Amino acid sequence: MRIVSGIQPTGNLHLGNYLGAIRNWVRMQDEVAEGGGDCLFFLADLHALSMPHVPADLTANTRAMTAALVACGIDPDRSTLFNQARVPAHAELQWLLNGTARLGWLNRMTQFKDKSGKNRESASAALYTYPVLQAADVLLYQATHVPVGEDQKQHLELARDIAQKFNNDYASPEAPVFTLPEPIIPPGAARIMSLRDGSAKMSKSDPSDMSRINLTDDADTMMQKVRKAKTDPEPLPSEAAGLEGRPEAKNLVGIYATFADVSVDAVLGDFAGKGFGAFKPALGELLVEKLGPINARFVALKDDHATLDAILEKGAGKARALAKPTLDATYGILGLCR
Ligand code: TYM
């Protein structure tokens, strides 16, 4: 079992990233340690070039996101933690896979459509070919499982399509070059929504900071964001079915259930008939209880640049060694002389 996943170091780590992906990374790290296999987690700094960016912010965010991941429980001694830019094999394999990825496949990617917006002509080429880099990220290490939120499912399907076509075109069925990776998507937290709009996903790119809980928010800020979260005037229902058509309520109850590790019905068992005046403080307290220790670890680590850089450099050394056999095999099978 080889677990591989990444996160862009743009902005803060928020509740959607945490519940959709990072909490699973930490769980898988612990499971893998018991059952054999290994985990690679990386900062997708090359992906950050797909949108306009400020270079100094990218450097700062790469370190801050590293501190946040360690604070969440990623252990750099047990998992390989690094940033893409320190492992050139990612960019190299992307180019090699560009020959296999089809334009028709890339044209179907909904994230490109969303992020390029109306002004598609001025979107960067990197935004368009981004999913090929993402395929390279996982295929390079023969990933078997990729823990992600729902929004990355389509990119993972593309990675499988690229792997399959490459294997068919160049390799023999007995000796495929690439493993087909499986996405691991948490059922209850696949898509955490904005606190301001239950139809938009919680995202780093939302201009309103009130739309998300950042793992770096202090307790007062978290309580305030939950208090101001958009809701409706109805009391909470007694069963999950009663939340249909109430996206904001469904999101908040879902967040509570995920953090408390209980079912939505169990949460509603405690709050049925009560309004948000009772539910919101309970949710805020639960968030502070669960995220407070992460925040404290983050604050203690975030300015220790020497430690953070050393973690990434050490992880990159391990990643470069793990990437080499697949990269060499790919060059070789394509007939490239080196
Ligand atoms: P990114 O940086 O946008 O998000 C990191 C992880 O958080 C998940 N996520 C969410 N899950 C639930 N609800 C939300 N509102 C929410 N917002 C974000 C994402 O699904 C993701 O798992 N392209 C990727 C980074 C990447 C990658 C990879 C991931 C690059 N290469 C290879 C896996 C494998 C991205 O931009 O994620």
Image (cartoon, rainbow, N blue to C red):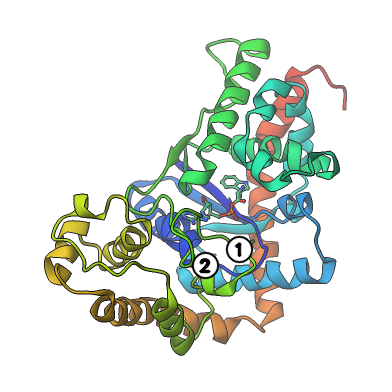
Which residue is rendered at x = 56% and y = 85% of the image?
Answer: 299
Q: Residue 206: x, y in percent?
A: 61, 63
The kind of secondary structure element at disc 2 is loop
Whether residue 263 can be seen here: no
Q: Residue at x 74, y 35 (%)?
A: 94
Q: Which residue is mark 2?
A: 14
Judging depth in this view, the residue of 244 and 102 nearest the camera is 244
Residue found farthest to the bottom? 220
Residue denoted by label 1: 204
Q: Position of residue 76 (x, y in %)?
A: 54, 65
In this view of the protein, which residue sits in the foreground, 109 or 276?
276
- Kindly tell me whether mark 1's CB lies below 8 Å from ligand 1: yes
**Quadrant location, the C terminus:** top right
Amino acid under label 2? His
| Residue 80 against residue 328 in the figure, above or below | below
Image-quadrant location for residue 7: bottom right
Quadrant occupied by the N terminus: top left
Residue for point 68% across, 29% down: 106
CB of mark 2 within 8 Å of CB of mark 1? yes
**For disc 2, does the CB lie below 8 Å from ligand 1?**
yes
